[in-house]
Amino acid sequence: MRWNGAQSLTGGYNNADIMTIMFLMLVSTLSLGSVGTVLPSIGKARIAGKFAFDVIDHVPGVQINEPGKQKINRDEVKGKIEFENVCFNYPSNPDLKVLKNFTCTFESGKSIGLIGPSGSGKSTII
């Protein structure tokens, strides 16, 4: 039965209808309240997504097979990289030497593995 404004509020509703309406109002209020806690996360996700799409859509300054540019094949590159008695420390921690008299030769076409404990300078060498 519908309420037409002339009836009393409970005139056309039984107890089950009133409990259902109260329950629905409670659940909807709680749901709307919880949306507010998610909104900051949605904003952060939108910013992170924009950064990701900016990286994906970025056009590099050097194009593959650009007209008028010489292409260098990997097989044509020859040489080696040598470190001889290299010492290094980060400016933020001058007392800690990351590399102490490091000497190594990286030959062209060869693979080499750098092993050592954390903070021993592996990433610094690369």
Image (spheres, helix red, strand yellow):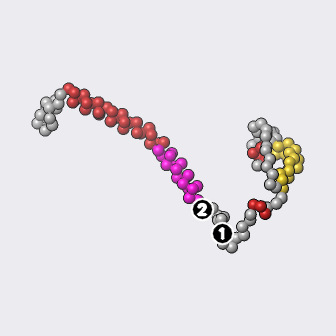
Magenta residues (range) = 42-58
Q: Nearer the viewer's eye, disc 1 or disc 2? A: 1
Give the residue displayed 84% in from the left and 56% down from the top: 80
Q: Which residue is mark 1?
A: 66
Residue 34 x, y percent position in the rendering: 40, 36
The residue closer to the viewer here, 59 or 108, is 108
Left or right, 111 with reference to 39: right
Q: Amino acid at mark 2?
A: Val
Say above or below: 116 vs 81.
Answer: above
Q: Which residue is mark 2?
A: 59
Q: Quadrant of the N terminus?
A: top left
The residue closer to the viewer here, 47 or 72, is 72
Give the residue displayed 74% in from the left and 65% down from the top: 72
Residue 43 in magenta stretch: yes
Can residue 91 be seen at all in this image of the molecule? no
Q: Amino acid at mark 1?
A: Glu
Residue 5 in magenta stretch: no
The local crowd at label 1, few if under 14, some if 14 to 19, many if 20 or more residues have their Cα within 10 Å, is few
